[in-house]
Image (cartoon, rainbow, N blue to C red):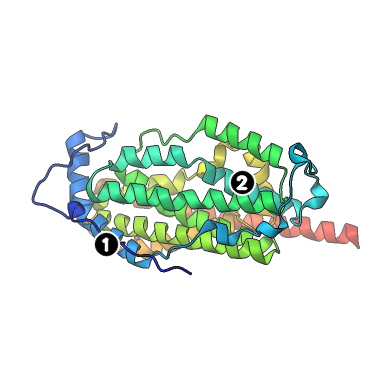
Amino acid sequence: MREQVGLTLPRRLLITSSTDLVGVPTTRVGPVQDTVRLLHDLEPAVVENLERHLSMAKEWMPHEYVPWSLGRDYADLGGTDWDPEQSRLSPIARTALEVNLLTEDNLPSYHREIERAFGRDRAWGAWVHRWTAEEGRHAFCIRDYLLVTRGVDPVELERARMDVMATGFDSEQKPVLQVLAYVSFQELATRISHRNTGRYAADPICEKLLARVSTDENLHMVFYRNLVTAALAVAPGPTMRAIADEVIGFEMPGAMIPGFTRKAAQIAQAGIYDLRIHHDEIVQPLLRHWAVFDIEGLDAQGEQARNELSEFVAGLSAQATRFDEQRARTQARRAARQA
């Protein structure tokens, strides 16, 4: 593997004595000057975590994870059209990979949203562009893998991509704290979804590829998670409110995918990503890391948010238990019929 060079943070990104941030985004929640102040207060943490990220990130090449020798022409070039029998993947694995890929495909919309929230200048802007460049690799290599191995119907995949990107992704101009909270949960959820999909696919090449993608997602999660930690120090009440709102209203960015509800149910039934995983491996680890139930001195807004959060998480755990029990009964009935 090649060694990456030149990942030192440019001097222009270092903090200065200025309290102004050029090109700061606006927000529909709270005065613009509050957003400017928050971005300035968090910028030292951005610089620190961007430097950390660049020191941890390893260069990798998407083309090195694709089995090109398995490729062959499709009908328009004298080959054969896709047929389900050509796929080495089970129907559920195909569904999970399609959902993961179509979610990654919407990167232009995600870039627009985080640039709106964070701005394009100084350390914030450097992170926005770095994050976008790293995320772009994910769709490249997953699509190449699926097309080369004939894992999915390429016509349906392309039509779905057009639908998803034509719909786009809109965060409804969430303020900075809510964006930071959301992407912390979303990046971790994406990491777990890719990792579990790779394992479920029962193809070593696919598992290796998605493990590599998951490593990127984990580094992104750590960056955002650490910024939320910094935000809890400078604005504990509003940050607690943002965390509660994003846990309670959480929705994966791929929810606009055609047939998403049905596909998500199939993925959950297969144990790739379900309520128990969401509670145990996404929500709880981040809440523990931030020690949200141990923070002292919260204002009334923060305390109310924490109470709502506690009640919701308890309900989520109960829902997960009911889902696990229902799935076990369904699997038992299916096994009995097969016997």
- SS state under label 2: helix
Q: Position of residue 114 (x, y in %)?
A: 36, 42
Residue 280 visible? The answer is: no
Residue 144 visible? The answer is: yes
- Tell me, for residue 309, which label it has, or none: none
Looking at the image, residue 251 sits to the left or right of residue 225; the answer is right
Looking at the image, residue 310 sits to the left or right of residue 301; the answer is right
Above/below status of 150 relative to 75? below
- Tell me, for residue 8, which label it has, or none: 1
Task: Give the residue at x 56% y 40%.
Answer: 255
Q: Residue furthest right?
A: 339
| Count of marks placed on residues | 2
Q: Residues within 10 Å of mark 1 (few under 14, many from 20)?
A: few
Q: Residues within 10 Å of mark 2 (few under 14, many from 20)?
A: many
The residue to which callout 2 is attached is 99
Give the residue type at disc 2: Val
Say which of marks 1 and 2 sits in front. 1
- Which one is in front, 263 or 19? 19
Distance CA(mark 1)–CA(mark 2): 35 Å
